[in-house]
Image: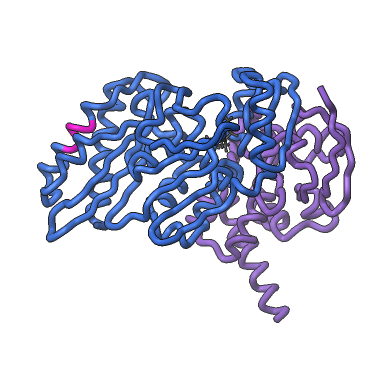
Amino acid sequence: MIPAAFEYHRPRDIGGALAILTEHGEDARVLAGGHSLIPMMKLRMAEVPHLIDLADIAALRGITVEGGRVTIGAMTTQHELIASAALHDAVPLLREAALQIADPQVRYMGTIGGNVANGDPGNDMPGVMQCLDATYTLECPEGTREVRARGFYEAAYMTGRDDAEILTRISLKATRGGYAYEKQKRKIGDYATAACAVLIEAENGRVSSAAVSMTNLSDVPVFSDAAANALLGTACDRDAVKAAVAAALAEIDPTEDNRGPVKFKMHVAGIIIARAIERAWSRA
Amino acid sequence: MTKHILKMTVNGETHEVLAEPRELLVYVLREKMGMKGAHVGCDTSHCGACTVEIDGKSVKSCTMFAVQAQGANITTIEGLGSPDGLHVLQQSFKEHHGLQCGYCTPGMITRAHRLLQENPNPTEAEVRFGISGNICRCTGYQNIVKAILSAAAEINAAKEAAQ
Ligand SMILES: Cc1cc2nc3c(=O)[nH]c(=O)nc-3n(C[C@H](O)[C@H](O)[C@H](O)COP(=O)(O)OP(=O)(O)OC[C@H]3O[C@@H](n4cnc5c(N)ncnc54)[C@H](O)[C@@H]3O)c2cc1C
């Protein structure tokens, strides 16, 4: 499969990339790891007359962990993210989730920025970033702004990013307590049939804070306040988990596809959410 | 569309080719450089038959434009061994019956090669996880895993003997 012809640009800095993006408007798109965009171009589901490769922009790379604040450059690959010991110490949920994305080859190329900017409901990192209450930095020629992951996703492939903006980095706080990313897939390397990220902190045997979000169970990732609230103050016993699962399931809207009918997805989601909560609690 | 002059090092030799941006690396390797080792299996980024090593990463070359590899250092199966001088991994695949039709083998071996660079002494589970981006429809993987584990042991023994 060969995509339609396009012009290839490889700017050396963000300013250069933004200038090309502005010049060509809707006809231009940035290329990160290419492991969502290139398959779409090959299938001719995406036509990109001007492709702007971000590979040479050093400012988009790297992970910093400082004083409990974590910053991840958009062009950091899943492989680099998994390999970072400092990141793992600060936010262990990220490695756990990244290891469940695709396969080794895809993880060497696929970037964190591409994963969260893509807008495919099947992408795992958007839900994870909502659970972590991460912030995305968006840059355009007029300046930069910050958007919370929890408010970024509007519909499948529709996000709060303007066409003229580049997502440059992700910022979040180091976490404490228990964490889990549980994912049910048809085979290793597949997108989720259902997946769930959970963070739980405990104090005196009770849940003192919680966050629950879900992947590929609606046309956007779903962050469930209600599920977290059902856990707060409880000893995370069976009834509390049951109530949290019910609250989470009430907020999703899966559709039937080749991963199964809606009833099956609701069933799988219930099991995955419960497992994620229980595992996070066991580590809290 | 503007064509690009691409320079890259493939298996230690510098190659220069002219390519359109939309040309995928696997086709440039096969059709412009004559290296037919990397195979086009699924052509949808799933099967791993087109895996090559680029600057220390295992990459599905059907999912990278050749222009992205400008200046890169690439190793394909042709760079690992030859019919008269098989690489340890190739020898081990042969001995353990790690292949049948052979279509996935170049990708499988280049991937295994990278895996052993990063993890010279993997467990069976780590080998299975490490080759999860490569599909084989003949062997059921059993003998591929055996071949990689045995090659790892052989490489490590040779290293120890050299010390
Ligand atoms: C076989 C296979 C299995 C996969 N399985 C999974 C899986 O289980 N879970 C999962 O989450 N993903 C999966 N993926 C997708 C993979 O993780 C992609 O790498 C990821 O979705 C996109 O990241 P990328 O860097 O490759 O982005 P690209 O493909 O380069 O870009 C994707 C989109 O985001 C835009 N974009 C990229 N970077 C930026 C930026 N910095 N600013 C603004 N826009 C940007 C691009 O213009 C494009 O529209 C799979 C892919 C394959 C091929």
Q: Would residue A85 appear left or right of B39 to someone viewing this image?
A: left
Q: In which quarter of the image is the C terminus of chain B?
A: bottom right
Q: The blue chain is which one?
A: A
Task: Assign the magenta stretch its main secondary structure.
Answer: helix
Which sits in the foreground, A22 or B89?
A: A22
Which sits in the foreground, B134 or A26?
A: A26
Quarter-of-image position of residue A18:
top right
Q: Quadrant of the N terminus of chain B?
A: top right
Q: Residue, x 71% and y 45% (percent of image)?
A: B52
Q: The purple chain is which one?
A: B
Quarter-of-image position of residue A139:
top right
Residue A211 locus on image (x, y percent): 26, 43
**Residue at the far front in the pictured view:** A142
Q: Would residue A229 appear left or right of A70 to someone viewing this image?
A: left
Q: Residue, x 53% and y 39% (percent of image)?
A: A113
Quarter-of-image position of residue A176:
bottom left
Looking at the rendering, the stretch of residues picked out in magenta corresponds to A244-248
Q: Would residue A74 appear left or right of A1 to someone viewing this image?
A: left
Which sits in the foreground, A155 or A23?
A: A23
Q: Residue, x 58% and y 44% (percent of image)?
A: A75
Q: Would residue A274 appear left or right of B67 to someone viewing this image?
A: left
Residue A236 locus on image (x, y percent): 15, 49
How many callouts does the rendering have?
0
Q: Residue, x 57% and y 56% (percent of image)?
A: B146
Residue A245 shown in magenta: yes
**Is the image coloured rainbow, by chain, by secondary structure, or in one colour?**
by chain
Is residue A161 shown above or below A99? above
Is residue B152 shown above or below A78? below
Residue B42 locus on image (x, y percent): 63, 29
